Amino acid sequence: METWIAILKTSLTLFAIINPMSSIPLFLQLTNNMDSAKRQKAFRTGVVVSALILVAFIFAGKHILTNFFQIDVNDLAAAGGLLLLLIAIDHLVFGSLERSVLKADQQDPNHIGAVPIACPILAGPGAMMTVLLTTSRHGPMVALASLAIVIGATWLILRFIDNIYRILGKTACTVLSKVFCLFIAAIGMRLLMTALKQYFA
């Protein structure tokens, strides 16, 4: 039972951080000049590449951090929490990250799918940090299960992106984006404060 609760909690956290719903307008803008087949190819590439990146972080991320950079979980939680907080603030107030992504003029679907859809939009620093922390706290099986759920949901959203956007509209997507960013800011603050408590305990 505890394992299923952990999977549910980490899936919700990872979904909020990957945030595919609020990125729908951005995905549509990036693939605006593509036909339907090329757009879906770009999205498939993005989902597959982002999944591979995050799986690699689940199995090798902690080893790389501890053995090469001498970073422990508390260091990662503090840095990751601060990063999530900054990402949320940027998205809520400035939007500079989104503008930099939209400057890409490469229209090859595989290229767009890998960069920027897979990384940094789907498998960004926040998602990488989240799967690492999940693996450290709950083990790789919980992290893999959570990732599978979120990647599956992301694939469904991108598969039916035009219908979803037609139903929700730009305003609803924008509202969802801001709500998810508030969640991300709260998650970042909690990670940061928890890590700081460990430092001063």
Image (cartoon, rainbow, N blue to C red):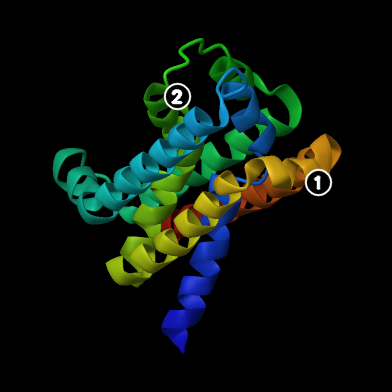
Where is residue 103 shown, x and y percent of the image? 56, 11
Q: Which residue is the site of mark 2?
A: 112
Which residue occupies 81% across, 35% down? 170
* Whether residue 120 can be seen here: yes
Q: Quadrant of the C terminus?
A: bottom left
Looking at the image, which is closer to me, 19 or 199? 19
Q: For the residues labelled 1 and 2, say whether their Cβ atoms are less than 8 Å apart.
A: no
Where is residue 26 shown, x and y percent of the image? 64, 29
Q: Is mark 2 on a helix, strand or loop?
A: helix
Residue 149 versus residue 56 in the image, above or below:
below
User: Is 186 left, or right, of 66 in this rendering?
Assistant: right
Residue 99 sits in quarter: top right
User: Is 200 left, or right, of 26 in this rendering?
Assistant: left
User: Is 138 left, or right, of 23 in this rendering?
Assistant: left
Which residue occupies 46% across, 81% down? 4
User: Disc 1 or 2, which lies upstream in sequence?
Assistant: 2
Q: Which mark is residue 168?
A: 1
Residue type at tag 1: Leu
Q: Which residue lies furthest to the right in this view?
A: 171
Looking at the image, which is closer to me, 191 or 84? 84
Looking at the image, which is closer to me, 10 or 68? 10
How many numbered marks does the figure carry?
2
Which residue occupies 35% across, 54% down? 132
In three-dimensional space, the C-alpha distance between marks 1 and 2, rounded to whole angstroms, equals: 24 Å
Q: Which residue lies furthest to the left in this view?
A: 67
Residue type at tag 2: Ile
Residue 22 versus residue 110 in the image, above or below:
below
Q: Residues within 10 Å of mark 2 (few under 14, many from 20)?
A: many
Which residue occupies 29% across, 52% down? 55
Where is residue 94 shown, x and y percent of the image? 71, 22
Q: Is mark 1 on a helix, strand or loop?
A: helix
Q: Residues within 10 Å of mark 1 (few under 14, many from 20)?
A: few
